[in-house]
Amino acid sequence: MKALVFERNLPRFAASRVASLLGSGRGAGIGPLQLLDAERPELPSDEWSHLRPLLAGICGSDLSLVDGRSSRYFEDIVSFPFVPGHEVVGVLDDGGTDHAGESLAPGTRAVVEPVLGCAPRHIDPACPECRSGRTGLCEHTAFGQLAPGLQTGFCSDTGGGWSTAGLVAHPTQLHRVPDALSDEDAVMVEPTACAVHAALSGGVAPDDTVAVVGAGTLGLTLVAALHHVVRPDTPCSVLVGAKYPTQRRLAESLGADVVVPPEQLARAVRRQAGSLVLAGRLTGGADVVFDCVGSADSLTQALAMVRPRGRVVVVGMPAKVSLDLAPLWHRELTLVGAYAYGVEPPAGPDGSPRRTFEVAVDLVGEAGLGTLVSATYPLERYEEAVAHAGAAGRRGAVKVAFDLRNRKGRTR
Amino acid sequence: MSPRPGFVLEVDRSTPPTLFWHGERFRLEKLPEGSRVIYAPEPLDPLTDPQAAIRHALQHPLGDRDPLPALLFPGMRLTIAFDDLSLPLPPMERPDIRQMVIEQVLDMAAEAGVDDVELIVALALHRRMTEPELRHALGDRIYDAFAPNGLLTQHDAEDPDALVHLGLTDHGEDVEINKRAAESDLLVYVNINLVAMDGGHKSVATGLASYRSLRHHHNPQTMQRSRSFMDQHHSELHTANWRMGRLIADSGVKVFQIETTLNNDTFPPAFDFLQKREWEWGVRDRMAFLGASKALDRTPARYARQLFHTVKSPHRMTSVQAGEVEAVHAVTTAHVWEQQGVVVEGQTDILTMGLPYISPYNVNSILNPILVACLGLGYFFNMYRGKPLVREGGVVIMSHPTPWEFNPVHHPNYIDFFEQVLSETTDPIEVAKGYEESFATDPWYIHLYRTGHAYHGVHPFYMWYWCAHALQHLGGVIIVGGDPAAVHRLGFRAASTMADALEMATDLVGPSPSLTHVHTPPILMSDVQ
């Protein structure tokens, strides 16, 4: 069995950072990521289950790691060596129990809600965030019975999705995959859950103008979340800045009202909002801007097109950026992060909040988000896979994933 | 020797390649044998003493109007309105006709003891002129006497306090024009009639009007029914303006119309080859062409554009007439036709045209893709009387680089129109229905129009409506050498060479098509029999 292992190795880390200057993902072969023989990880306790991955996605945060560009902020909430891969659909060969306490028969497909909160860490009493269901904000991601790791895929004890040896999952992390969903649909559940959480935490109000900066996986799933989850109760206009033709086509098909190249987004927002322009920024602007890129440029763009007292939601993972926050102060803007998932309105049938993953499972099926999986690769071709993911937009792709089903992989 | 009339050449084996404008460059194209090339008449002899001619016109008006001196009296309010920088093209060498005419009007006003005189640029929804542009049009003496005292203003179609609603025509059209002009004892309007569309009642009813008024005739339906808008008697655009003009007159606004025509000596001697028939090029012309072509090919478009916009035209006045609007305009139109008219037998399958760097709406600016379309399909296509030069279902091939490039100061709304509206639809009717009002009332565009140098928010729509007749009539439009992305956004097809374009055109008009080329400069009008 094989696994892609990410080790703490500063020279390799530096080499990948240099290689990434040629393009994101170009340093996979010389960086800290290596394909090694691997054993099935041990179960931390009896309640855990083994999950054999079928598909495991390559996320933007994974690319940042491979490129050596992720923030040092994360250093103490990951543990080395770890197997990346937190967007995972797999099979419970030995069965298990899901987040709701229901028994899952051997052979059941499941997706992993990768956050490693208080429950998987056997911390009792749980922190306030976990007690309220907001596990993404767990205060104990470096504590308890597991090695530090904010998520499966960043923790040395759990394994990750980029492995044929599999990973271990706590019942609170497991969600059964409905039969109607394909593996491709299922591997999109985790990024979709991030988008659902962002969409619902954006504070979108009826008739708002909403701008989405970036149309990679997060941007596109966010558009789908706004269209299918937010808009039924809260009508709003959604404008998207998408760099590549494929992204623009997909954003339109997923429900965006206006899709334009990024440099045209501010003008489109200005037209929609009826704003004036002053010193290159809108005097009015969008009520809510979702930044699905997380760069200094995208954040600057977002701050320049949001209305006074508007809200900028940072969805894409940022690193250290240089930013002029004068408009934030002067225009009383709200700059807020949207990370991972937990529980969300809308309420479930019984009126109780639903877990973000449950909403995401429904959304993936409703919007057909499995079609966003553009290419899959076997583990052995990981350098190609990561390079493809790094150039996804330019190459007309959205989500690139590892196919661990003994297939040779495919591209489209 | 008197100037030669226009001419239609039939291309044969011995015909040299034909010169095409191509934005800031030139191209020589070998047209297929049997093609026709239409050349304009040679420049008419100018008036030998234009100052005397102006004085005579003012003192001997046409139609039911007293001589200008008899209309001037102490204590009166006199307003002089004049055409903006969209005329003439290119801007003429100093002294500009406006300066020559207005100086004489002001002299007569001074002799009559008129103190209350204001000058208004009749720019309608065009951009405001800059100080250098105004100085060029009026001369320093007039500018310095009026501008510092606030007596030289630019019509503001968005200032409710500066507009007056005179009523509705019998077709229900609002007539709302500049208040100062309407409430003056006499409104003198000074025209430069470059083409047959200019002047007449359109001067006041359009040049000094508001959007509320203009929208009644600046719309796709009117333009589709104007065949062409260069032919007043078959132009719905003019019919509407005439209704409005008569209402303006009936409202008590006394207009003293002054119209002037120019000969078509369009470019200075260094560019003589542009206006000559190619087989008559001498050694000097060939050298000038080669030198200019090579230099321009090596010059970045931005600098070439700047260079061309410094060119001043040696246009000379061929006529001046003054008095009552309709009587004046009939004479003016005859002069325009005398200079520009060419009789052409029958229509063609394919019409080719080389588009220059300039149109009425990009003086000192960029000919953006919308203006490229307007220049080709709005202006050149409509330069006919009788029937269009190209048959219904035929093809227009234009030569222009058509860069995806806009002047953000002059044309900020054009950028949004191009990005947002044309990406949704290129159908003028749908464009008008879906987007016009929101652009026309956009506060940002209104702000830029009123305080900066931007065209009004609705102006790109009008440019697109100008194409409506052609878009309805043609089977296809091809742009040779155009930026493919920009050309496709316009809804047209891009070709890299004329040969490719002709091959593409045959898909639409069939094999062995007839081809006619309109040779410009100078501009010409085809009288299609």
Image (cartoon, rainbow, N blue to C red):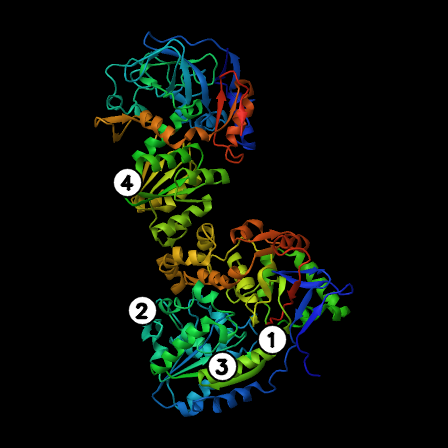
Q: Secondary structure at mark 1?
A: helix
Q: What is the x, y in percent for residue B330?
A: 51, 82
Residue pointed to by mark 3: B329
Q: Give the spatial CA distance, label 3 vs label 4.
A: 60 Å
Residue A162 shown left or right of residue A108 in the figure: right
Q: Secondary structure at mark 4?
A: loop
Disc 1 packing (10 Å; few <14; some 14–19; many ≥20): many
Q: Residue at x 46, y 12 (%)?
A: A165
Labels 2 and 4 in the same subunit: no
Instruction: Please tell me which of labels 2 and 3 falls first in the chain.
Output: 2
Disc 3 packing (10 Å; few <14; some 14–19; many ≥20): many
Residue pointed to by mark 1: B340
Q: Say whether residue A72 is visible.
A: yes
Give the letter of the chain under mark 2: B
Mark 1 or 2, which is nearer the eye?
1
- Comparing A116 with B273, the one in front is B273
Instruction: Please tell me which of labels 1 and 2 falls first in the chain.
Output: 2
Give the letter of the chain under mark 3: B
Residue pointed to by mark 2: B160
Q: What is the x, y in percent for residue B110?
A: 42, 88
Q: Give the spatial CA distance, label 3 vs label 1.
A: 16 Å
Q: Amino acid at mark 2?
A: Pro
Q: Which mark is residue A234?
A: 4
Q: Amino acid at mark 1?
A: Gln
Labels 3 and 4 in the same subunit: no
